[in-house]
Amino acid sequence: MKKHVFVIGAIAGLMAMATVGCSKSNSNVIKIGCIGPLSGDVAVYGVENKNGVELAVAEINAAGGINGKLIQLISEDDEGNADKTVNAFKKITTKDGAKIIIGSLTSGCTKSITALSQASKVIQIAPAATAVDITDAGNYIFRACFIDPFQGTVGGKFAAENLKAKKAAILYDITNDYSVGLYENFVAEFGKNGGSVVAESYAKGEKDFNAIITKIKSANPDMIYLPDYYGTVALIAKQLRAQGVTAPIVGADGWDGLTSNAGDEVLNGFYSNHYAADSTSLYVRNFVKAFSDKYGKEPNSFAALGYDSVYLLRDAIEKAGSEDVAAVRSALEASDNDYVTGHLTFDAKHNPVKSAVIVEIVKDDNGGLKTIYNTTVNP
């Protein structure tokens, strides 16, 4: 198994070198592009992912790089907009000449460039895009996260087995593939466990959920499933609690960032995630310390997935012995190592085979919110 090297002292001096873009060819560097929403509605995802990527790049460069070459990171903001993801891809691959890309973060933005990556033979690792068809574009597309069917199944199983729920209410975004995929797989698993479901849908951009919450409340559910991103979840949770709905709320990895963007209304909340920061794993403990020392805060799962994406590439490039994309792709397919988000291998569709955790939102010692490990669900 590959041991990650944590070298903190030299990171600051190498960060500038690691993140500078350059249009000229340089045989002494390995260019890696990073695309994500650094501004916009889901900026927490992109900023945290980029922080994790930059930390891994700095550690690797401080330890001597990969096969004697330093990583040159080229980051672009797509604002969570698929058209801007495409523009960022073209800039990174054409102007900057990178043949490896980490990104984007949301499923829609990620899917906007998978066909381009495949056609151009650019290795693309999606850190957090969980929609099933992300890797359908071809054999140059990978992801570091588990997929929506697994997350939806985890949510349904947790609701039935751990919360002992018999009736679930679901509010989901009918215009969002991520939300719909989680909803469908939750329903299937919860039904297998004897549960019944009442569901209400809405469209992206809606702010007032009171009418559908009134319907949900009348059904008297044992729990609420909210398969959406943290901004919308915060709005729904506040309106649920305002109407007196006190049942547990459950979600998925799109909730990451919620503890910084919501209040006590999200207590009694649980969600599936890629790792738990309070894990006793040495990989997790070292990562959390390095990240906290650098950024002054605890890393969320998007930071962990970005970090793991870089180390996945490091391991594959070392194993391939070069940056030849076909050789690196083959080495990635054979991945079998421990990372922050768990032990990882890839299936035939380049989806990782690894476990998920359920975390719970609780109060911290200062009256704020934090997440703690609740349980693990294996594939």
Image: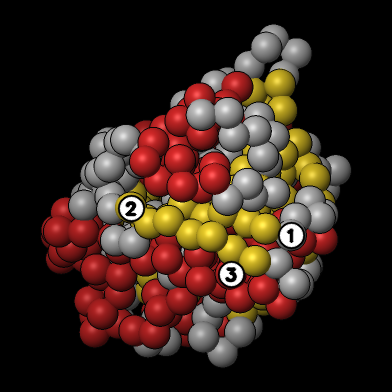
Name the residue at 18% across, 62% down. Answer: 86
The Cα atoms of the two marked residues, 1 and 3, are separated by 12 Å
Quarter of the image for the N terminus: give it: bottom right
- Residue 28 showing in the rendered view: no
Q: Secondary structure at mark 2?
A: strand
- Most extreme residue toward the front is 218
103 left or right of 297 in image: left
Residue 135, position as x, y percentages in the image: 42, 79
Closer-to-camera residue (161/49): 161
Name the residue at 24% across, 68% down. Answer: 112
Few, some or many C-alpha atoms within 10 Å of disc 2 (few <14, some 14-19, many ≥20)?
A: some
Q: Is residue 24 above or below residue 248?
A: below
- Which amino acid type corresponds to the residue marked 1 in the rendered image? Lys
Residue 73, position as x, y percentages in the image: 36, 49
Name the residue at 80% across, 45% down. Answer: 374
81 left or right of 376 in image: left
- Which amino acid type corresponds to the residue marked 3 in the rendered image? Val
Q: Which residue is mark 2?
A: 202
Few, some or many C-alpha atoms within 10 Å of disc 3 (few <14, some 14-19, many ≥20)?
A: many
Q: Which residue is mark 1?
A: 166
Closer-to-camera residue (212/112): 212
| Label of residue 187 in the image | 3
Of marks 2 and 3, which one's residue comes earlier in the chain?
Answer: 3
